[in-house]
Structures are given as structure tokens and as C-alpha cells.
Image (tube, rainbow, N blue to C red):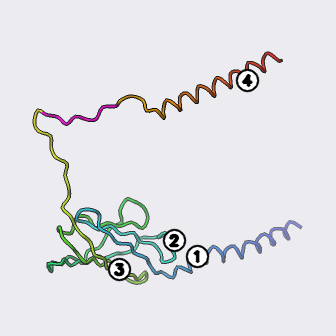
Amino acid sequence: MRTLRVLLAALALVPMLFLAAAPAAARDGKLNLQVAGDGATGVTIRASYADGHELETLVRLVLKATSTSGDTIGPIQLNPSGEGQGFYTSGPVLSPGRWQVTVSAPAPTPAEVTVAVEAKAEQTPPKPAPGNPVALPEKTGISRGVWWLIGGALLIAAAGSAVLLARSRNS
């Protein structure tokens, strides 16, 4: 009887193995690349499978770029960023101006995307004048929402105490 149960349990698991393998097989290795400027002189890329699933392994991405003035950059191999699985960054590789950026991935995960990117010089905050430190905004106290939260908590505590007191008197 016990052998029969083990055999039936094993047979029940076989279809589940095929279902678990189906999404991986459906991806077929095609990538979706979303390419954009990083707000300064770099490029960010988000790579995922064409069906929308996150990448399970690192892929090799290569960047090439051409400016409107004819300058070229690349090919540059892109490194994964610390933002999560499937995110890549170029670092500051573009000079300020308009660029046609092409990011490609070779086989077995073929993909290629070309986008226009506006690279801008990095902005730095102004330095305070010597002897005149920048004044930070002062806190004006506890906000109204916090006071309402504190009042509500006190009201709930008082109601709970009243219920416990009434129960102890009835006992």
C-alpha cells in the first residue's frame, strides 16, 4: 500500500515538471532592451526577456554611439549595475549633445535597439560663499498629521483601558 502511494505521488509530480519548464522554453532567448540617457553623459539599459520575464543570467550588451557632429564611441561592453537584475549602465561616456545610441546583444540572446539620447553636462550644486554657510530649512515642529495620529492612538488606548476596567469590575 505504501509503495502504491509513493508511485502515485511521483506520477503526480511529472506534469508539474513540464509546467515549470514551459516558461523558460517559451522565452526563446529573445531580449527586450529599453535604452535611455541617465540625465547626464551616460546611458542606462533595462534588459528583460521579450515575454516580460526578468533575466536569470547576465547577458553581454555592447554600446555604440554617434553624435550629430560625427563623433563616435564604441563598441563598449556594458556592465551590470547595482540596481537589480537586468539593469546595465555605461558610465559617463558621452559628451554633451545629441547622440544616436545603439545597444546590441549577440547570440544566443539577439537584440538591437537604437535610440536618440540627449547628453547633458553634469550639474553640481553651487558652493557656499566662505564665511556664509548655507542655511538649512528649519523644522517648524510636529506636523498636523502626526498630531492626529498621536491623538488617535491615545483615544484607542483610553477606550481599551475603559473596556478592561469594565470587565474587571464585572468579574
Circle 3: residue type: Val
The amino acid sitting under disc 1 is Pro
Give the residues drawn in magenta, as a range. Answer: 132-139
Task: State the mark number for residue 23.
Answer: 1
Is residue 14 toward the left or the right of residue 27 in the image? right
Q: Characterize the local packing of mark 1: few (<14), some (14-19) or many (20 or more) Cα atoms within 10 angstroms.
A: few
The residue at which mark 2 appears reads as: 53
| Quarter of the C terminus within the rendering | top right
- Residue situated in front as seen by the camera: 94 or 144: 144
Viewer-nearest of discs 4 and 3: 4
Residue farthest to the right, as pictured: 1
Q: How far apart are marks 2 and 3 (CA)?
A: 18 Å
Local crowd at mark 2 within 10 Å, few (<14), some, or many (≥20)?
A: some
Q: Position of residue 16 (x, y in %)?
A: 69, 73
* Labels 2 and 4 touching (C-beta < 8 A): no
Q: Distance between the residues labelled 2 and 4?
A: 53 Å
- Please name the residue that numbered disc 4 is placed on: 163
Q: In which quarter of the image is residue 115?
A: bottom left
Q: Are marks 2 and 1 in contact (CB under 8 Å)?
A: yes
Which residue in the protein does label 3 denote?
113
Task: Quote the CA–CA distance across marks 3 and 1.
Answer: 24 Å
Q: In this view, does 108 lie to the left or right of 93?
A: right
Q: In this picture, is 132 found above or below 47?
A: above
Q: Position of residue 151 (x, y in %)?
A: 55, 27
Give yes or no for contact between labels 3 and 1 (Cβ–Cβ under 8 Å): no
